[in-house]
Amino acid sequence: MKKKLKSKKAAKALAGFLFAMLFFTLLSRGLYAYRMPRIAVGQASVKSIAKTLRVEGVVAKDKRKVFKASLTKEEAAYLKAGDTVRLLFQDETIAEEGCTVLAVKKYEASVDLSGSGNRMTPGMEGVMEIEVASGQYSSCVPLSAVYTDGNKNYVLLVREAETIFGTELTAVRRDVVVADQNESVAALKDGMLDMQDVLIVYADRQVQPGDKVRLLEDEDT
């Protein structure tokens, strides 16, 4: 009889111990998950990169009121006669909208200023602005998805793994080369990503390669 009582007590003690271990494991797991960076994810897409081209120039001393700006080879490729640009003068406090490019020759753009009246005088320096779009890129991601480590750029892919606690998400580094970018989008060199790759585009705190992460829920936003 005494042996049976001792056996029951031992069984209860063991059950209590196992229950306590499970409770603390789940509690620790919950706290660990709470501390994980919360992330939003996305995938690469095909698009062109739109950006604002800004080139300094000067009002030429010419019979016809013309703004002239020297261009690089890359800048000249974006401009042609007939394009419409914006000109800014006096620390960009004066704007001339809808000015027509007269010609682009030998990496120099000539812009018609004949409609500006007497506000612009020869020798005035200014800035020419034009919205341009590059050709399409096959692998564009939000600029927020691109991280920098020294001279290298990388993105963080999300990998899934099944554990006893369910599906775990891990941030995995993938080095990339940025071919072009604007204020919000980066175009990556072809072959850097597959279209099915899922990457982190936002995190509520710093994420390092190898970190466990969890997806943002509706109540987090």
Image: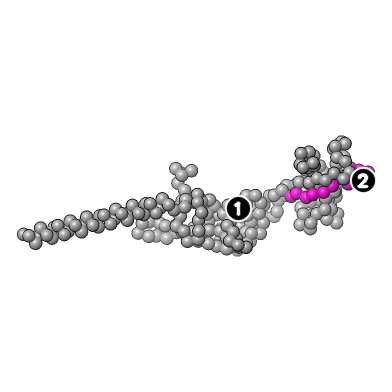
Give me the disc on residue 143: 1
Q: Is residue 179 above or below residue 124?
A: below
Look at the image and tell me whether residue 131 can be seen. yes
Q: Residues within 10 Å of mark 2 (few under 14, many from 20)?
A: few
Residue 93 lies in quadrant:
top right
Q: Amino acid at mark 2?
A: Asp
The x and y percentages for residue 180 are: 67, 56
Magenta span has 58?
A: yes
Q: Position of residue 17 (x, y in %)?
A: 23, 57
Which residue is nearer to you in this view: 128 or 142? 128
Residue 3, how many percent across, how many down?
A: 9, 62
Q: Is residue 17 left or right of residue 150?
A: left
Q: Is residue 200 above or below residue 89?
A: below
Q: Residue at x 89, y 43 (%)?
A: 122
Q: Secondary structure at mark 1?
A: helix
Residue in the foreground of this view, choosing between 22 and 160: 22
Across and down, in percent, residue 113 comes to 85, 41
Tell me, yes or no, whether the two marked residues, 2 and 1, touch with CB atoms within 8 Å. no
Which of 148 and 66 lies nearest the eye of the viewer?
148
Labels 2 and 1: the sequence-earlier one: 2
Amino acid of disc 1? Leu
**On the image, numbered disc 2 is attached to which residue?**
62
Q: Kindly report the distance in space between the C-alpha atoms of the residues bearing marks 2 and 1.
A: 44 Å
Left-right relation of 209 to 5: right
Residue lying at 39% horizontally and 54% vertically, measured from the top left = 32
Magenta range is 53-65
| Res. 98 in view | no
Q: Secondary structure at mark 2?
A: loop
Q: Residue at x 50, y 51 (%)?
A: 205
Q: Quadrant of residue 6?
A: bottom left
